Amino acid sequence: AQTVTQSQPEMSVQEAETVTLSCTYDTSENNYYLFWYKQPPSRQMILVIRQEAYKQQNATENRFSVNFQKAAKSFSLKISDSQLGDTAMYFCAFMDSGGGADGLTFGKGTHLIIQP
Amino acid sequence: ETGVTQTPRHLVMGMTNKKSLKCEQHLGHNAMYWYKQSAKKPLELMFVYNFKEQTENNSVPSRFSPECPNSSHLFLHLHTLQPEDSALYLCASSPDGSSYNEQFFGPGTRLTVL
């Protein structure tokens, strides 16, 4: 079974700073997908970024980028120029390539607080 | 605002009650999911439906009973729940069961079992 570990329960940074959220995972699969989801206080979970394990290039989406280290099974999220609206719970998630029939495996989440 | 809606948003029930949670998606998706989000625990996958067929029951107690009458609607029927079942129940949908697809989440139903 896959597991996802987020070792930072809470982080707080000043607006405009860069912050990195860590995520490690454990799997015996070679092909899989990794995701970062954001859950703002309104509780609607939304996708931030995703990475295919077979791609060496790190995914980027505007201010969000990942550092994917397959050998180390590490998948960190970097948020540049942080904004107040980035305050939320951030969940790292894993899905193997066998299909969505297994759903997503989530970490416990990191509560990110952006201070004005 | 995503295309996934859940009702009710809040529910308080006794252990002997029977209630149902409803999820509806307007995205034309064919896969739907139930997740349970408890405090200080990772989101837990409960059930998966792909093209109206249940493809996953993640060792969920029988007091939770899912129903998927069509690709747009998903229900979670609840009966004789326990206080430890209190949690946020999230519904999600995706185009199909493929791994790469983004799952779109609803706002959740906050369930309290007394």
Image (tube, coloured by chain):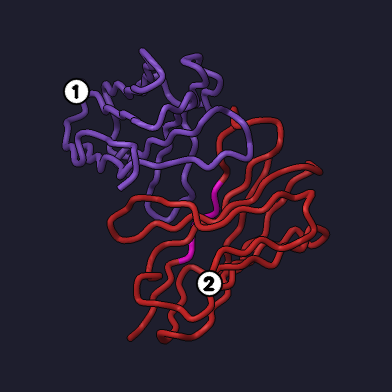
SS for callout 1: loop
Q: Is residue A30 above or below residue B95?
A: below
Residue B16 got which mark? 1
Which residue type carries mark 1?
Answer: Thr
Mark 1 vs mark 2, foreground winner is: 2
Tell me, yes or no, whether the highlighted magenta stretch contains residue B94: no
How many circles with numbers are drawn on the protein?
A: 2
**Where's residue A29, x and y in %?**
78, 41
Q: Which residue is drawn at 52% across and 23% down?
A: B57
**Where's residue A88, x and y in %?**
38, 65
The residues tagged by marks 1 and 2 sit, at their Cα atoms, a distance apart of: 49 Å
Write the start and end of the magenta stretch as one range.
A106-110
- Chain shown red: that is A
Which residue type carries mark 2?
Answer: Arg
**Where's residue B99, x and y in %?**
63, 36
Tell me, yes or no, whether the highlighted magenta stretch contains residue A109: yes
- Quadrant of the image containing the N terminus of chain A: top right
Write down the quadrant of residue B109 in the picture: top left
**Where's residue A17, x and y in %?**
49, 85
Q: Is residue B3 above or below residue A113?
A: above
Q: Report the residue marked by disc 2.
A: A63
Q: Mark 2 lies on which chain?
A: A
Q: Which residue is drawn at 67% across and 43% down?
A: A2
SS for callout 2: loop
Density class for disc 2 (Cα within 10 Å; few <14, some 14-19, many ≥20) is: few
> Could one spot residue B114 in this view of the protein?
no
Chain B color in figure? purple
Describe residue B19's horizontal placement relative to residue A34 as left or right: left
Write down the quadrant of residue B87 in the picture: top left
> Could one spot residue A52 in this view of the protein?
yes
